[in-house]
Image: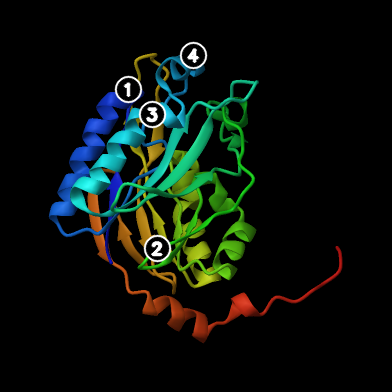
Amino acid sequence: MKTALLQLNVSDDPAANLAETVGLIADAAGQGAGFVVTPEVTNCLSMDHAHQLQVLQHESDDQTLKGLREAAVRHGLWLSIGSLALKTGDADGRFANRSFLIDPAGQIVARYDKIHMFDVNVSATETFRESASYRPGDQAVVADTPFAKIGMSVCYDVRFAYLYRALAQAGSEILLIPAAFSPVTGAAHWEPLLRARAIETGSYVIAAAQTGTHASISGKSRATHGHGMVVSPWGEVLVDMGTDPGIALVDLDLAEVAQSRQRIAALNHDRPFEGP
């Protein structure tokens, strides 16, 4: 399966972001991609809750989801929408950070709500409280496709190895880790974490990323690390997109998953233990 990663520099304007993303999907399809993956918060990257309340929509009304489903049909391809920021019916007004897998008929094959919330103090000037605006999910998801079983996750999930072990033991051959990673933690941890998740599970890791400084109507801008990556089941970095927006293509050979898991069958070697 020829797979295309989209590396985006989205703003907090969903309509403008959709137009850019649809154009890149068309370019990827023109280069032969049958599976396209986008990063976290493909529709809107914003640090301003009031602005999000104005521009975000519920899933049933979301124009980005509608437009991307139409693009999948138009080009006859599978599409992973890394995630969309969406309104929910929650009484506390928190949003969902929701990933979608779309088939070539435009149908939603799977949904996944990000489980782990990015509540961290990166530095004296960079603090995040994702759980203040987003409610966490509680369901791990493996999606069946004609070309692979796909385990879904989003960004900060990458630090929780048990999630990926569970996904792989449930049959996942490809692990999706779309992200809008901090430049500080990205420089230190992004590649090692992605390679670790691939090596531990003998899976392909596909990690589409946001990159650069993101334009903001509200003036509260944010920067992201970029470096969208594909890592082989043996831990080799097959793609590193650097920091420029654009497209990268890679051919996936699922036989490598079986070969890696046969060479090191760690997924079958769990042992019960006590403590600590």
Is there CB contact under 8 Å for labels 3 and 1?
no
Which marked residue is nearer to the observer: mark 1 or mark 2? 2
- Type of the residue with mark 2: Thr
Residue in the image at 86% along x and 64% along y: 275
| Spatial separation of the CA atoms under disc 4 and disc 3 | 18 Å
Name the residue tied to disc 2: 145
Q: Quadrant of the C terminus?
A: bottom right
- Which badge, 3 or 2, is on the more N-terminal residue? 3
Where does residue 120 sit, x and y in percent of width and height? 61, 35
Give the foreground label among 3 and 1: 3
Amino acid found under the numbered disc labelled 3:
Asp
Q: Which mark is residue 50?
A: 4
Q: Is residue 178 visible?
A: yes
Q: Position of residue 256 (x, y in %)?
A: 39, 78
Q: Secondary structure at mark 2?
A: loop
Sooner in the amino-acid sequence: mark 1 or mark 2: 1
Label 1 sits on a secondary structure element that is: loop
As measured in the structure, the alpha-carbon distance from the residue carrying label 3 to the one carrying label 2 is 24 Å
Q: Residues within 10 Å of mark 2 (few under 14, many from 20)?
A: few
Q: Marks 4/2: CA distance? A: 38 Å
The CA distance from mark 1 to mark 4 is: 14 Å
Left or right: residue 175 versus residue 245 is right
Q: Residue furthest left?
A: 30
Which mark identifies residue 13?
1
